[in-house]
Amino acid sequence: MQTKYIVVLGSLLSGLGKGVVTASISKILDFYDCRSMPMKFDGYLNYDCGTMNPFRHGEVFVLDDKSEVDMDFGTYERFVGADMDGSLSITGGKLFSELIKKERKGDFLGRDVQFIPHLTDLIISKIRDASERLKLDFLIIEVGGTVGDIENSYFIEAMRQLSLAEKTVFVNLTYVPRLSSVGEQKTKPTQIANRNLMQLGIRTDIMVCRAETKLSSEVKQKIALFSNISQDMIIEDPEIDNVYSMPLEFMEQGMDKAIFGKLEIKAPKLNRLKVEAWANATKGMRRHKNKVRIAIVGKYTNLKDSYASVSAAVEHSANWHKINPEIVWIESDLIKDDDSAKSALGNISGMIIPGGFGKRGTEGMIKAIEYARTNGIPCLGICLGMQLMAIEYARNVCGIKDADSSEFNRRAANKIIDLMENQRSLEEKGGNMRLGSWPMSIRENTLAMEAYGSDKAAERHRHRYEFNNAFRTEMEKHGFVFSGISPDGELVEIIEWPNGKGIGTQSHPEFKSRPERPSPLFNVLIKRASDYLKFSA
């Protein structure tokens, strides 16, 4: 089957969940055994997300192939269940960089290079290349930003041109507010936003309406009338506490039939085993009787999207154990001493110290780690969190009082954590950390072995600093466990406390967690947390 295209646009405002809509459509197509993948266009001029601050952009997601991409790719992978390809992440920076290189080589034969046709042609070529290389039945294209933004206007124009040559369905995500002062839902914002889209030459095929409450029949009639679509092409996007139920919610409203109908193709046979498997893996989330309180102690907790994959991995593993997770967000700067640590962590079941960069907030994390270790609270350290677990142990158990990281103090006498040798001569910051999937060997009779059930594993990485092997022997004398090591024996991948309650990994295991296949290390944390302190939901 020749590739068909589904374009997801936001015509009113950002933050409505285009990523979830895109991922849900891809999952629906998977239920029909169709080969589909999402693609994301982002208008910013960064080459990729690698140098972006999580406070401004949310987490940077990393793929197996070392690509640093938008956090929506985490949503895609969690829904689709397949590893994404870095070529499916297209930024304005990548496009302009490639276009200018072509111009410098003389590829345009003296012509003046313009947005139309040169930039739009390049965008369309990326779409077709991905479709052919990945042998896709469907490519679902999410256009980042909102209609009317300057930075995504050339993407929208390229989508219009694509639709002239290829079978394309346009899905418009909008918002229908309910004003408490008048007590009714208002359709005018959606009408105006859709009119703006039509002025750009694009007609909405399927309207997805985000709303706090169910749309009334009168509201649907009005949206249909002024948007030139039938009412059965209006799909409600309700407020729900379990986003993984969205594909099934959309199917109940006929999203699958709408897509196949608009593309004028016969619907393939629905694979009911896949539908049942997804429903069984996701239906119980946040509905179990028992719960655990998991503290996430980090430096970016004021923007929860900074740790989107961490909180998702907690949900996956908790649901796997039939437990309802309550995440307690703790800004590490607020932990100053033993009293503040006890106040913040005195009533939790387990703790996660997530990744991050820079010195700010690290002493608070170290104090939290000390409190967890000395009180037997299950703990998972991720990347920076693992490094801080090593520093805390070196200071408070091994007696290396000035133990530190060269990231925080270049003049530190005892650099438990130090810059990787191949990072020392680098001048540029983008795309040159230790990235992507890396293998490791697992020691027997360890928490890591319990988690993975194998002496080999692989996880994704994103960092520049590593454990300093000069301190490995000394820390082992004091009971510190090095349970995961790179195959060449040079890089420490996983560390553990001798009490079996704490484990830290240099990798980011949250990036590979799926509802049907939770992360092994998060599974161990949730199991230990449940044994430590369980509450009635």
Image: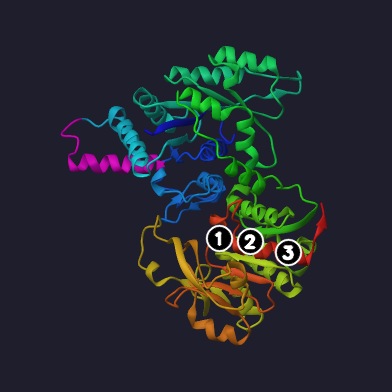
Estimate the spatial distance between the alpha carbons at disc 3 and disc 2, rounded to whole Å.
10 Å
Rendered residue at 42%/76% (across/down): 488
Estimate the spatial distance between the alpha carbons at disc 1 and disc 2, rounded to whole Å.
8 Å
Left or right of residue 306: residue 343: right
Q: Are marks 3 and 2 in contact (CB under 8 Å)?
A: no
Left or right of residue 9: residue 424: left
Estimate the spatial distance between the alpha carbons at disc 1 and disc 3, rounded to whole Å.
18 Å
Q: Which residue is mark 3?
A: 529
Q: Are marks 1 and 2 in contact (CB under 8 Å)?
A: yes
The foreground one among 33 and 209 is 33
Q: Which residue is mark 2?
A: 522
The foreground one among 232 and 359 is 232
Q: Is residue 401 magenta?
A: no
| Part of the protein shown in magenta | 89-111
Disc 1 residue crowd, few under 14, some 14–19, many 20+, Cα 10 Å: many
Q: Which mark is residue 509?
A: 1
| Secondary structure under the numbered disc 3 in the rendered image | helix
> Splitting the image into 4 quarters, where does residue 395 fall?
bottom right
Rendered residue at 47%/51% (across/down): 83
Q: Is residue 105 magenta?
A: yes
Residue 342 coordinates in the image, percent (x, y): 78, 66
> Splitting the image into 4 quarters, where does residue 489 fall?
bottom left
Quadrant that contains the N terminus: top left
Sequence-wise, the earlier of marks 3 and 2 is 2
Q: Amino acid at mark 1?
A: Pro
Sequence-wise, the earlier of marks 1 and 3 is 1
